[in-house]
Amino acid sequence: MQANFRPGEQRTFTEQARRAQIIEAAVEVIAEVGSAGASFAKIAKQAGLSSTGLITYHFANRQDLINSVVGEVMAAFAGHVGPLVDAQPTPADALDAFVGANVGFIRSHRKHLLAVLDIAAGSRATENGAAASAAVARADLDALEDLLARGQRQGQFRQFDPRSVAIAIRSLRDGILGALTVDPGLDLDAYGKELRTLVRLMTAVHTPGEAP
C-alpha cells in the first residue's frame, strides 16, 4: 500500500470520501479523548476501518491528519460564516450576522470545534504551534476590529476602542464552548438571542439623554 498525496494532487471521489471519513472519525476521537490520546488505532476503529494502514495510505503521518482536521473545520467555519456576513448591506447588519452565524456553527459543529480547541491547546506547547495559533487568532481579531471600525466611520456604532470591543465580542463567542462543557443542555437559541442583543447594546449609537 502506497499513496499519500502532495498538495494540489488530484484525488478520486472515492479517495476524497475516504479522507473525509477518516477526518470525521479523528474529530470524534479527539473530542472524546483529546489529541494526545487520539491514536491511529482508535481513529481506525471509530471509522470502521480494518487497518491503520488505510489511514497512512491517505495521510503522510499523524501530524498530517491533525493538520487536515484543523484545515477542514476552519474551511467549514469560513464557508458558513463568511457568506452570511458578506451578504449584509451594512456593518451593523454584518456584526449581527457574525454573532448569529458563529452561534449557529457552534450548534452544528460542537465536536469539531472542541477537537480544534484541544489541538490548538496542544500545539501551543511547541514554538511553531504557538506561532500558528497566534496567527489564526490575530487574523480573526483583525477582521472583527476592521468591521467595528467601518461601522464607526459610517456612524452606525458609537465611539469606542475597536480592538478592545473586538476582544470582548470574541471572548463572549469563545465562551460558548466552555459553557457547553459545563452545561451540555444549554439553550443555544436563547444564548444566541441574548448575545446578539448584548453586542447591539455594546456598540449602538446612543441618542442625547438616552442611558448608555
Image (cartoon, rainbow, N blue to C red):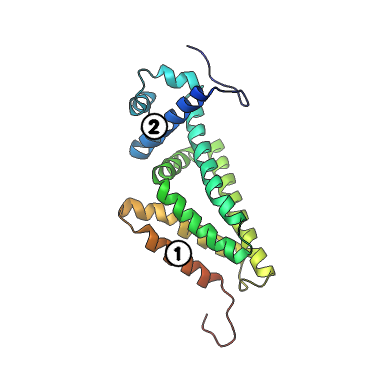
**Which residue, as the protein is rendered here, is positioned at the far front?**
13
**If you read the primary sequence from the N terminus, does the residue marked by circle 2 or circle 1 appear first?**
2
**Amino acid identity at mark 1:** Leu
Please tell me whether residue 115 is drawn above or below residue 172 in the rendered image.
above
Among the 4 quarters of the image, the one containing residue 190: bottom left
The residue where tag 1 is placed is 195
Residue 79 percent location from the top left of the image: 55, 45
Q: Nearer the viewer, residue 179 or 161?
A: 179
What residue do we see at 59% from left, 66% from top? 92
Residue 150 left/right relative to 180: right
Residue 7 left/right relative to 60: right
| Secondary structure state at the residue bearing disc 2 | helix
The residue where tag 2 is placed is 25
Can the viewer see residue 101? yes
Please tell me whether residue 88 is drawn above or below residue 158 in the rendered image.
above
Can the viewer see residue 164? no
Residue 208 percent location from the top left of the image: 59, 86
What residue do we see at 34% from left, 36% from top? 33
What's the mark number on residue 123? none
| Secondary structure state at the residue bearing disc 1 | helix
* Crowding near the residue tagged with mark 2, few <14, some 14–19, many ≥20 C-alpha atoms within 10 Å: many
**Amino acid identity at mark 2:** Ala
